[in-house]
Amino acid sequence: MEEKITAAAEEYAPAETKSGGQKMRRTRREKFWAYFRRNYMLYLMTIPAVVLLLIFNYYPMAGLQLAFKDWNPWEGIWGSPWATNADGELDVLAHFKTLMGNDLFWTKFGNTLRISALKIVTGFPVPIIFVLLMNEMAWPFFKKLSQTISYLPHFISWVIIAGILMAMTQTDSSMQLLLERVFGHQVLFFADNTSFLVLVLVSDIWKNAGWEMIIYLAALSTISPELYEAAEVDGAGRWSKMRYITLPGIMPAICIRLIFTVSGIASAGFDQIFNMYNSTVYDVGDILETYLYRTGIVGGQYDLSAAMGLFNSVIGLILTLTANWIVNKAGGEGIW
C-alpha cells in the first residue's frame, strides 16, 4: 500500500520538483567527475594499496568457509565437503556445537577474558597518565629523552623479552636473591599462577605504554596554546588546566583507543603468552589463541580451529559495535 502511495505521489508531483531533483543529482555527478579529472593521479596512486588490500585482507576471508566444512587436505578448502555430525548427517554448525560443548574451550575463553580485562584495567590508564605528566615537563631535552626511552621497548620482540624475564627470575639470579630478602622466599613467576599474571601485566605495560602514548601526544598537539595562556591569566593552576583543558582535548583519542582496546578483549596477546607460558601455569595462562594454535596448527584440526577463530572474530565485532554505541551515547566521538 505504501509503495502505491509513493508511486502516486511521484507521478502527480509537480514537474518543477522532479526536474529539480534530477538537476541536483546531475550537478553532483558533474562535480564528482570534475573533481576526479582534477585529482585523477591521486586515485591512480591508491590502486596498488587497494589491490593489496583485496588480495591479502579480503580474499583470505573466503577461507572462513572452512569453519563449516570437514577439512580434506587433498581437496583443499573449496573442495572439502560440508560438515556432518556424529550420525553422518549434514550439519554445517557441527564444529561450533563441538566447541560449545567442550568445557576446555570455555576454560580457555575464561582465561582470555580474565587476562584481557586485567590488561585494560591496569594498562589502559598508564599512557594517559604518562602523556599528562609529559605535558607538564618544562625541559624539552628531558621530554624528548623520556619519549624515546618509553618507545624503545615496543620494538623488542616478545621472544627476547621472555628470554630476559626467564633469565632474571631464575633461582640463582640477583633478582631472586633480592626478592628473597624482601619477601622471605623466592617468587616463582613462571610456576605460580598469581605471580605469572602479575608478570604478564607488568611486562605488557612496560612494552606497550610508551607506544600507545603516541596517539595521545598527537591529540595533545592539536590543543591551542592560547587556552593555557587564557587559563593562566584567569589564575588556573596546573591541576585545573590538566582537568579542564588537557583531558577534554585528548578525550576523542581516548574514546577511539578505548573502542579498539575493548574490541580486542577476546585476544589476550598470543605473542606474549606463547613465549612466556608453560604447562605449570596452564590454569590461568592458556588462552584461546594458544589453545587454537595447539589444536589447529599442531593437532591438524584446521576446520575446528577455523570455527574457533570465527567465533573469536564475531565476539570482537560485537564488542566493537557495543563500545562504539556506548561512547556515542556518553557524548564522546566514536569510530562512526
Image: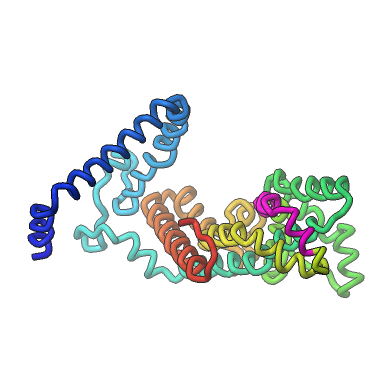
Q: Is residue 265 left or right of residue 325?
A: right
Q: Residue at x 8, y 57 (%)?
A: 8
Magenta span of residues: 213-231
Q: Hey, which quadrant is residue 321 in on the image?
A: bottom left
- Say if 329 sits above or below 246 in the image: below
Residue 259 in sight from this viewpoint: yes
Asked whether 42 falls inside the magenta stretch, the response is no
Q: Is residue 279 left or right of residue 71?
A: right
Q: Is residue 84 left or right of residue 232?
A: left
Q: Hey, which quadrant is residue 48 in on the image?
A: top left
Q: Residue at x 71, y 56 (%)?
A: 209
Question: Residue 134, percent across and down?
Answer: 79, 56
Asked whether 214 falls inside the magenta stretch, the response is yes
- Say if 255 sits above or below 21 in the image: below
Q: Residue at x 66, y 53 (%)?
A: 219
Residue 104 in sight from this viewpoint: no
Quarter holding the N terminus is: bottom left
Q: Residue at x 83, y 69 (%)?
A: 235
- Say if 28 sits above or below 192 in the image: above
Question: Residue 223, percent across and down?
Answer: 69, 54
Q: Nearer the viewer, residue 231 or 192?
A: 231
Q: Nearer the viewer, residue 186 or 165?
A: 165
Q: Main secondary structure of the magenta part?
A: helix
Question: Residue 256, percent across and down?
Answer: 56, 58
- Say if 121 sits above or below 26 in the image: below
Colour logic: rainbow
Q: Hey, which quadrant is residue 31 in on the image?
A: top left
